[in-house]
Amino acid sequence: MKSAEGNLQSRQRAGNVARRALDGEYDLLLACRDLASLRSHLQDVPDDVVNTFVGVASEVDDLPIGAERRNWSLDALKANDIETKKYREQVRGVVTEALRQLLAVLGNRAI
């Protein structure tokens, strides 16, 4: 029962992350990182959708986003923020579409 309960919570979390990102309340890159970590609970989601999150998360694993920003110097943040912003804009369209597809799948099945 714990496994099914954990899966349900993970799927609800995935839906929450996707909605918040689409609403502009949560960073797209952080959303990809979160969703990539939940991929084992998203087995009914098409591979190309999940692979979008995994691929983006992989590309930003060395960038200061999220809580780890507090561990970086201001100079390093300035330099990396330019790269982060550029990459975020580069992937915005594909990530937004993947988030919509994820919500469609989660909405059409019992979460």
Image (cartoon, rainbow, N blue to C red):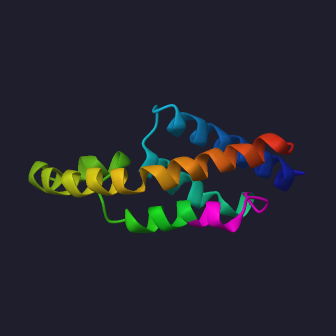
Give the residue displayed 73% in from the left and 47% down from the top.
Answer: 11
Image spot of residue 39 (x, y percent): 66, 61
Give the residue displayed 14% in from the left and 56% down from the top.
Answer: 79
The residue lying toward the viewer, choosing from 89 and 63, is 89
Residue 81 to residue 21: above or below: below
Lateral position of residue 60 relative to residue 98, left or right: left
Q: Quadrant of the C terminus?
A: top right
Residue 57 to residue 28: above or below: below
Lateral position of residue 55 relative to residue 84, left or right: right
Q: Is residue 111 visible?
A: no
Give the residue displayed 67% in from the left and 41% down from the top.
Answer: 15
The residue lying toward the viewer, choosing from 57 and 99, is 99
Q: Is residue 47 magenta?
A: yes
Lateral position of residue 24 relative to residue 110, left or right: left
Q: Residue furthest left?
A: 75
The residue lying toward the viewer, choosing from 68 and 78, is 78
- Residue range in magenta is 42-51
Residue 25 to residue 64: above or below: above
Image spot of residue 50 (x, y percent): 63, 62
Q: Is residue 28 magenta?
A: no
Image spot of residue 44 (x, y percent): 79, 60
Residue 31 to residue 53: above or below: above
